[in-house]
Amino acid sequence: MPRILLTGGNGFLGSALLEKPAFHDALVVGRTPPILNINFSPISLDKVSDYKKILSGIDILVHAAARTHIMDERSNNPLAEYLNINTHATLNLAKQAANEGVKRFIFISSIKVLGEKSDFGHPFNSTDQFNPQDPYSVSKVEAEIGLQKLMEETNMEVVIIRPPLVYGRGVKGNFAKLMKLIALPFPLPLGSVNNKRSLVSIENLVDLICICLEHQKAKNQTFLVSDDHDLSTPELLSLICRVGRYKNRSFKFPVWLLALMLQCFGKSSIFERLCGSMQVDITHTKTQLNWTPPFSPESCIENCWSDRF
């Protein structure tokens, strides 16, 4: 069995990875020990840390730690904050990993490196050009560029995975907010929205990462990932309501008027997330790895409700 090192083991994705047999003996590094692992080494992930001791004997490094996208950003210099963790710390770790003979470095990036939205019916694919729109996505782009350069200069293999919105048991952020809205007895004016969005369940994302641990054709590849089942906002609402056994209170309302109302309240970004399209084409991922997402959105959304309210 390859020796694995995991960063971000206490996070949403890291916790799910540690439930898999491949990660049971993984070395986990970070500031806080995860619940499911006793093989933990406390260390700060930054641009100056020395990782030589923990990297000794490691075959595969899965880098899931990151400063995640913060909706209510309070930093005076958010770009610097994101770059410190998501770019400089990542590249410091990766360079030392290459020097210590780590065979493969798996980096969890984000679909946001390609933009905030796609044109309806024209999904992002793995060959699209970078188009970051905020400090978080800029930091992920810079990390990807640095890793690609490192891949060309060393013998370490690099695998980059770009997920869209990730949901599953214990999910937080926008998906959790949507679930809370559905649980409240209030109507939602989203029945007329005509869009398509790609999402990925934590189960499908974890499955792909486990495939990439040793798959020969994952070497030096960039993969987009989703459930391969795009949904409009009304379709997603209907599915979440049905699985959670809540009444679907969405109703038809002019989309242009909804956009105007949210704009007046300075909430145009909410409109884009609810009404814009964000699709990804995972054809390259499926054909390169002979992989199909094994879990259905319905079963994974059911897991979201399992520990709610």
Image (cartoon, rainbow, N blue to C red):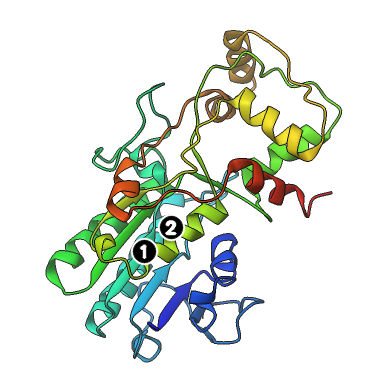
Image point (43%, 62%), residue name: 209
Image point (86%, 28%), residue name: 185
Q: Amino acid at mark 1?
A: Cys
Relative placement, left or right, of 54 versus 11 is left
Write down the quadrant of residue 11 in the picture.
Answer: bottom right
- Residue identified by numbered label 2: 208
One can see residue 85 in this view? no
Relative placement, left or right, of 163 versus 74 is left
Q: Are marks 1 and 2 in contact (CB under 8 Å)?
A: yes
One can see residue 298 in this view? yes
Residue occupying the far right of the picture? 185
Q: CA distance from mark 1 to mark 2?
A: 6 Å
Indicate the position of residue 128 as horizontal and vertical percent values: 25, 38
Write down the quadrant of residue 244 in the picture.
Answer: top right
Image point (47%, 49%), residue name: 293
Vertical placement of 147 versus 154: above or below?
above
Indicate the position of residue 266 as horizontal and vertical percent values: 60, 24
Relative placement, left or right, of 147 versus 285 is left
Vertical placement of 298 versus 289: above or below?
above
Q: Secondary structure at mark 1?
A: helix
Vertical placement of 56 versus 9: above or below?
below
Q: Amino acid at mark 2?
A: Leu
Image point (41%, 41%), residue name: 134
Q: Which mark is residue 212?
A: 1
Tell me the quarter of the image containing the N terminus.
bottom left
Indicate the position of residue 54 as horizontal and vertical percent values: 40, 88
Mark 2 packing: few (<14 Cα in 10 Å), some, or many (20+)?
Answer: many
